[in-house]
Amino acid sequence: MFSVLKSFLETKTTLNNDAVTHICSHFKFLQTNRNEILIRYNDLAKHYYFINKGCVRLFTITKEGQEISRYFAYEGTFVTALPSFIDQKPAEEFLQTIEKAELLSISRADFYKLVQSFPEFAKIYTEILELGFIVAQKRIYGFQGFDAMEKVKWVIKNQPQLLLRVSNKMAASYLGMSPATLSRIKSKL
Amino acid sequence: MFSVLKSFLETKTTLNNDAVTHICSHFKFLQTNRNEILIRYNDLAKHYYFINKGCVRLFTITKEGQEISRYFAYEGTFVTALPSFIDQKPAEEFLQTIEKAELLSISRADFYKLVQSFPEFAKIYTEILELGFIVAQKRIYGFQGFDAMEKVKWVIKNQPQLLLRVSNKMAASYLGMSPATLSRIKSKL
DNA sequence: TAAAAGTGTTGACCTAGAACAACAGTTTTG
DNA sequence: CAAAACTGTTGTTCTAGGTCAACACTTTTA
């Protein structure tokens, strides 16, 4: 049950076995179906989720009612509505499983307690932030000035999982184009 | 000379006077002209800069030779090519003053030494990362699905300094539109 | 398991904004 | 301070990609 998280902690840190077990003990196991909502638009993000299995999506809805995908997270990574988790303001986004998933959830209070108690765990948080920052940067800047074809090539290169695991519709909204355009582009390679 | 940085540290942390002075002693004062390049495309970011006065821009150049602005930083904030600073890989972007500026620079080694020695300074680094992350998020998601007019309104609301201090050309490239389009939109409010 | 709802693909049309160009200021340079 | 280089604005033209619609599949629901 904690094996994925354990090996994550073991490869990322030098925490000993007891510490790892102690950290894991704060996580609650969570089975979900497809399309289950974990965080709603007006919620405060109260938990951090570690993905054991499955795929989780962050998205919003425009005033016209259209879903726009922001981010996809896969097994072996942490995910939450981070700005809300940090500042405890309304998320203004949804967190949703898009496949049957197994998650480990930790409360915000426990998470920060661990950050305070274990410098090695704090390091993981810093890494999450650094990585999140870098991925966000790459995403913005990688797309700037790209036409539709270039965006698709970019995503194939930088996030190869995406087009394979995610529906065309969701991928298209992530890429900022209509499903029709994405479909046409894929047919031209 | 260190007054802006000092008051920044004092409002953000509970560091005592000695610690603040000690931290400041690691920064080197730097006067620059307009349009001076601080970090080049293939450089590794070796310094963090605190802006005493002036405005600093992060940008890249497309293969067609067009400059694309990524980020603008103003007095009282830290700036560098952060992904490069973190990973010590080539910046793949330029850091440039766009006004006469007064900067305080600290070397990467000293910066991380301070992060390690002063938990309160580490907290500042965490805040920089969190804020950087949140701003980047807002920027991506704020723009998603927006047409040109909406982007301009967004930037007026969320980064009011931008249109006032930055040339139309730079602002347009930040917003992902041509200078002509930005000009036309401004004329319609 | 039949009906209903959702998804991917393709075709026809249309529009937001890019590209190009001309010109008036403004700033830089020698 | 004259010439050269840059910037902002506006008009004209052109195109990438959006919208709408039709259809075949697939998935969900009752």
Image: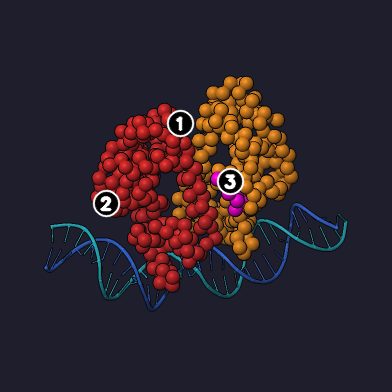
Chain colours: A orange, B red, C cyan, D blue
Q: Residue A21: tell me if it is visible.
A: yes
Q: Which residue is mark 2?
A: B100
Q: Residue A145: tell me if it is visible.
A: no
**Label 3, label 1: how many angstroms apart (C-alpha)?**
23 Å
Q: Which residue type carries mark 3?
A: Gln
Q: Chain of mark 3?
A: A
Is A95 in front, or is A4?
Answer: A95
Helix, strand or loop under label 1: helix
Quadrant of residue A68 within the rendered picture: bottom right
**Label 2, label 3: how many angstroms apart (C-alpha)?**
39 Å
Residue under the image location 39 percent in, 61 percent down: B163
Q: Which residue is mark 3?
A: A88
Q: Which residue type carries mark 1?
A: Pro
- Up the image or down, B187 lies above or below B16; here it is below
Q: Position of residue A176 (x, y in %)?
A: 55, 57
Quadrant of residue B109 within the rendered picture: top left
Q: Position of residue B104 (x, y in %)?
A: 31, 41
Question: Which stretch appears magenta?
Answer: A87-95
Residue under the image location 33 percent in, 51 percent down: B55
